[in-house]
Image (cartoon, rainbow, N blue to C red):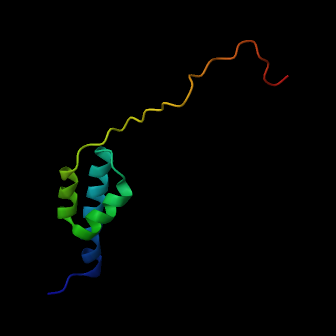
Amino acid sequence: MELHPAIAFSIPFLTGLLSAYLAEKRGRKWSTWFFVGFIFGLLGAASLYLFPIKNKEKVLTTSKPKTPVKNQKLWF
C-alpha cells in the first residue's frame, strides 16, 4: 500500500510545525527545531523537553539609560 505524496509530506511537515511551536514557547530557535521535527518526527519534538527552558529576557549591561532632552527644538 502506497501513501499519497501529499500525505507523505504533510505528516513530517506537521511534526516540524509542532516542534517549532514548542521550541518557540521554550525560548529556542524555531527554525532549528522545525527541521529536527521534520526529520525525526515526534521523537524530535519530544527531545525538546530534554533541554532546560531558556530565559527569554536578555539583559543589556553595556547600554546607558536614556535621558530625556529638555527644551531642544528638533525641526526649526
Residue at image position (25%, 75%) is 7
| Position of residue 1 in the picture relative to residue 72 (left or right) | left
Residue 18 vs 58, above or below: the answer is below
Residue 14 in view (yes/no)? no
Residue at image position (71%, 13%) is 70
Point out the residue furthest to the front here. 62
Of residue 26 and residue 13, the one placed in the foreground of this image is: 26
Residue 57 position within the rendered picture, expressed as x and y whole percent measured from the top left: 38, 35
| Position of residue 48 in the picture relative to residue 55 (left or right) | left
Residue 70 in view (yes/no)? yes
Based on the displayed image, in which of its 4 quarters is residue 46 positioned? Answer: bottom left
Residue 67 position within the rendered picture, expressed as x and y whole percent measured from the top left: 62, 18
Residue at image position (27%, 57%) is 19
On-image quarter of the N terminus: bottom left
On-image quarter of the C terminus: top right
Residue 13 position within the rendered picture, expressed as x and y whole percent measured from the top left: 30, 67
Point out the residue furthest to the top here. 71
Point out the residue furthest to the right here. 76
Q: How many marks?
A: 0
Residue at image position (53%, 31%) is 62
| Position of residue 55 in the picture relative to residue 3 (left or right) | right
Point out the residue furthest to the bottom here. 1
| Position of residue 7 in the picture relative to residue 66 (left or right) | left
